[in-house]
Image: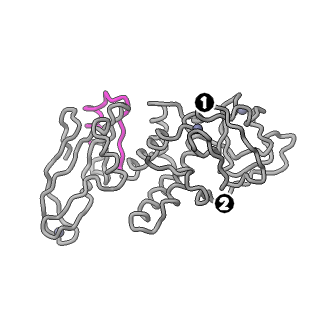
Amino acid sequence: MFNLTARHAEAYSQETFRCGNCNRDFSAKVITWVDVSRTPQVKQSLLTWRFNVIQCTSCGCRQFAETPFFYEDFHEGLLVAVFPKIPDSRGQVEAAIKEKYGYYPVLEYFYDMTQIWTLLRFQSHYGSNKHLKQLSRMGTGEERLRKFLKFLKEDSLMIDIRERLTESLVGDATDDDMTELLNKAMYKMEEMLPWPLDRRCICGGDLLKDFTCCGKRVRLVYQEQLLSHHYAMYCPSCKEPLSEASCPDCGRVYTWKLGTVQSYDRKNRQGVIKPEASLDFKVDPRMNISDH
Ligand SMILES: [Zn+2]
Ligand SMILES: [Zn+2]
Ligand SMILES: [Zn+2]
């Protein structure tokens, strides 16, 4: 099933498929290995679900091939064996791959296309958002990549992302719904906290002391009454929305997108955490995780 050949930008295999519509067999070429550091356009076809889509030669019907493939990102030192469906002898297959490709800095197995899709969305978001890069506590390079992978494999939010994706493929969910979910995922991975109205970090640091973006201090017009989860300020230089701030002393990150608390100081903590029922970004379309 697997074409275990040497390293290359792309490898293909000619295979026989049965059409789900007319039930006839047909032959089609599918990608079995792709290095996205050399063929970055493949990322787009994965994000738009056009990757390994085959067409029946009898009736013209299109379907997803569901054949496994290797997703390589040479620059990131990543190799993922992607199985759109769980193979029968999963343990043996994994062992064989590990024996052959165990020299990759990061070797991973995905058993769901949602995982590769979500990984690409995370990477593109972190690649384009300067403010987030500056606040991020996820590190860079391999450190961050491993945190993404942990989330993709273990976090319960992946169930929601998978459901929402299925809905959006049949046209039942909007892109806003998906953006909201991906933002939630990001807050979770970054371990962000609800915003304290007294602007003091758990450690006592002043959250507005070093409010910067693009290397410059942003003068913040702080209006408590505006701190709903809809609210965002914008960096005058890069125009990115600013709705998070990090503590200059300990680095913890806070956002009012997760709701607000009165204070993290035990002495004047009167209110309890009141997270918003759901995060709503419709008012603020620029708060998108999207590909630019
Ligand atoms: Zn057909
Ligand atoms: Zn900026
Ligand atoms: Zn702090």
* Disc 2 residue type (three-letter): Ala
Identify the magenta region: 93-112
**Residue 61: which disc?**
none
| 98 inside magenta stretch | yes
Check the image and name the residue furthest to the right. 267
Q: Is the residue at mark 1 in contact range of ligand 2, meaning its CB lies under 8 Å from it? A: no
Q: Secondary structure at mark 2?
A: loop
How far across and down, in percent of the image, does residue 273 sit? Answer: 74, 51
Residue depicted at x 60% and y 30%: 215
Disc 2 packing (10 Å; few <14; some 14–19; many ≥20): few
Q: Is the residue at mark 2 in contact range of ligand 3, meaning its CB lies under 8 Å from it? A: no
| CA–CA distance in space, label 2 to label 1 | 34 Å
| Mark 1, residue position | 215
Check the image and name the residue furthest to the bottom. 22
Q: 110 above or below 215?
A: below
Residue depicted at x 36% and y 46%: 110
Q: 277 above or below 272?
A: below
**Residue 277: which disc?**
2
* Disc 1 residue type (three-letter): Gly
Query: In this orientation, does residue 67 appear?
Result: yes
Q: Name the one closer to the observer, 19 or 232.
A: 232
Q: How is the image coloured?
A: one colour
Residue 23 image-quadrant placement: bottom left
- Please identify, in this view, whether the residue under mark 2 or under mark 1 is nearer the observer: 1
Q: 197 above or below 229?
A: above
How far across and down, in percent of the image, does residue 61 sit? Answer: 21, 67
How far across and down, in percent of the image, does residue 159 sit? Answer: 48, 56
Q: Secondary structure at mark 1?
A: loop
Residue depicted at x 70% and y 31%: 210
